[in-house]
Amino acid sequence: MRGIAVLSGAPPSFSVGGSLRVVLMGALSGLVGTLILLGLRALLPKRWLIQTILFYVVIILITLWGLRPVDTQRLMLFLPLVLVYGFLMRILTCRRRAVSEEAIVE
């Protein structure tokens, strides 16, 4: 986050309150993203592609809502982070299919 502050022209500074706010907002955002993904899995079971598209649409819309005012610099700084977050959530939480005993050829 410090890199984003430097790129956006903020003066160099550090505060415990500011750092705590960034950490807590990140944790809250992760929790909301998890709840969105779990809700999509419950509503659309076995529809992996539709779940993924809707998940990306929702998290991008939430990001755009939080980036008020929206400008090119903020989009260039935050949208890659959102896309990486969405990718990691989908990859790291994918369900592994169990292989049946009959499917294994000896």
Image (cartoon, rainbow, N blue to C red):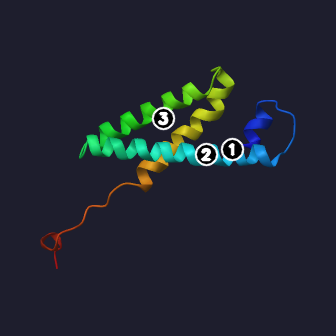
- Residue bearing mark 2: 26
Counting labels gives 3
In the picture, measured across the screen, residue 103 lies left or right of residue 83, that is left
Give the residue type at disc 2.
Answer: Gly
Disc 1: CA contacts within 10 A as few (<14), some (14-19) or many (>=20): few
Q: Disc 3 or 2, which lies upstream in sequence?
A: 2
Circles 2, 1 touching at the beta carbon (< 8 Å): yes
**Element at label 3:** helix
Disc 2: CA contacts within 10 A as few (<14), some (14-19) or many (>=20): few
Please state the horizontal and vertical placement of residue 64, each as a whole percent of the image: 55, 26
- Residue bearing mark 3: 59
Q: Disc 3 or 1, which lies upstream in sequence?
A: 1
Say which residue appears at 87% left-offset and 39% top-offset: 12
Image quadrant holding the C terminus, namely bottom left
Please state the horizontal and vertical placement of residue 42, each as a whole percent of the image: 28, 45
**Element at label 2:** helix
Say which residue appears at 59% left-offset and 40% top-offset: 81
Image quadrant holding the N terminus, namely top right
Residue at the farthest left position: 102
As rendered, which of 66 and 71 lies closer to the eye? 66
As rendered, which of 105 and 41 lies closer to the eye? 41
Q: CA distance from mark 3 to mark 2?
A: 13 Å
Say which residue appears at 54% left-offset and 38% top-offset: 82
- Residue bearing mark 1: 22
Please state the horizontal and vertical placement of residue 72, each as a whole percent of the image: 65, 22
Give the residue type at disc 3.
Answer: Ile
Above or below for 94 versus 22: below
**Element at label 1:** helix
